[in-house]
Amino acid sequence: MTLGVADALARVRSRVPVLPAEAVELRSARGRVLRQDVRADRPQPGFDRAAMDGFAVRAADVASAPSAFPVAFEVRAGQWPERALPAGAVARIMTGAPVPEGADAVVPVERTRGVDDGRVELQVRPEAGQHVAPRGSEVAAGERLLTPGRRLDAAAIAVLASVGVARPLVGRRPRVALLVTGDEIVPVDATPGAAQIRNSNGPAVTALAEDAGAEVIDLGTAADDAAALLSALARGLDSADVLITSGGVSAGDYDLVEPALERLGVSLDFTRVAIKPGAPLVFGHRGDVLVFGLPGNPVSSQVTFDLFVRPALLAMQGASGGGRLRLFARAEAPFVNRSGRENHVPAALRFGPEGALVRPLRSQGSGDLAAHARADAIVVLAAERTAVAAGETVPCWLLPAVLERDAEEA
């Protein structure tokens, strides 16, 4: 059964079970999907806070500048002021320290000059509120700060720490069993024979799955042999939330994955998608265990993983989104689509004053790993869009490589 990309993705999403939540240590929470509301346990800041190193003053006391004032006391970060600020005096204060009662502004230290007899000269007239963060100005007590579905990054983890959430509730990581099939596959550290290739799909799909938050169970490789496949697939179905195979799902005499899955009780939702690369894509389920049969061609396996498996893995954890970042860009050179299918073309992306610009990369097809590794983005051409002229706008999704480039390169 051949489905369009949108219909196939809808089938996948309809089968995704949401895994249970679990509490984890904050140091282990990066990349996990939040499954709780997070609210402020107190106002932030909890006091009027100095935003600069300098001197806390009553703004109304500074009638002109420069003016000299006695320094009444000092307030460090983490220290509560010993008393209210007397009229006509200033208090030396550090960034992050509580502003003493009576003071309503901070003059930065670089706008002052020390003079004799413990006094300081203010070289500017401050306005009330200057360089002071008022109590509760950032966050009110009880305010919602994070919502379920957020994938936790450093900024979110900082918020959790700031409100005392030491063990956030997150979605359990999916267990993914991965099997690479094919007589031609040899280990990465082996020297291939004349008709053999090294196992690039295993490490690549493992990396993609782990990037999507999964734990990977490596089932190794299996030859194009029905008994060997049955044994390996059975282990995967019994040990994981998701079974992923690579290879053996096309229409050749030695493409044995589909019949083996059916013998093991897997219901197949679809076996082909109208997409290039990656048309021979199998998806099914046995109970709550999801099964993805990815194509053996390495670029096909990576593209179809990003489009179908990644959203499923993140949805299982309760994520509110799961696809790669998408945008529209202007073509710098023509694109051609003669496939009659939704075509995903590796492209080079750059950002100029006029916005995002893309051009196609030279590629030999779904086996050209080097071209895919050079790509910053994948341009999506609808089946009916047979050509794109330079200057036209095209949709694309971003590959991780573009997000790691220096700003000057982008």
Image (cartoon, rainbow, N blue to C red):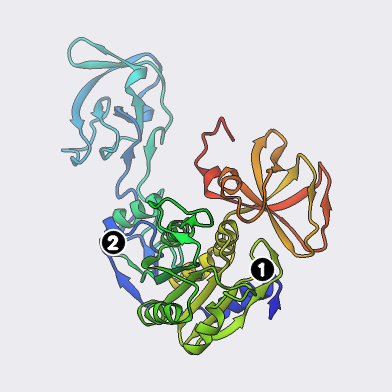
Q: Secondary structure at mark 1?
A: loop
Task: Tell how many labels.
Answer: 2
Circles 1 and 2: CB distance less than 8 Å? no
Q: Residue 117 sits in which quadrant?
A: top left
Q: Earlier in the sequence, mark 1 or mark 2?
A: 2
Q: From this viewpoint, which residue is outermost toward the front?
A: 194
Q: Residue 104 sits in which quadrant?
A: top left
Q: Quadrant of the C terminus?
A: top right
Q: Residue 320's spot in the image, x, y percent? A: 51, 67
Q: Which residue is more in the foreground, 408 or 80?
A: 408
Amino acid type, residue under disc 2 in the picture: Val
Mark 1 lies on residue: 279
Residue 87 relative to residue 302: left or right: left
Amino acid type, residue under disc 1 in the picture: Ala
Q: Residue at x 37, y 37 (%)?
A: 132
| Disc number for residue 79 | none
Q: Residue 393's spot in the image, x, y percent? A: 77, 48
Q: Residue 298's spot in the image, x, y percent? A: 55, 58
Is the residue 277 above or below the residue 1 in the image?
above
Q: Which residue is more in the foreground, 35 or 349?
A: 349
Label 2, residues with CA under 10 Å away: few <14, some 14-19, many ≥20:
some
Q: Which residue is more in the foreground, 155 or 274?
A: 274
Q: From this viewpoint, which residue is outermost toward the top?
A: 116
Q: Which residue is more in the foreground, 307 or 13?
A: 307
Label 1, residues with CA under 10 Å away: few <14, some 14-19, many ≥20:
many
Q: Residue at x 63, y 76 (%)?
A: 10
Q: Secondary structure at mark 2?
A: loop
Mark 2 lies on residue: 165
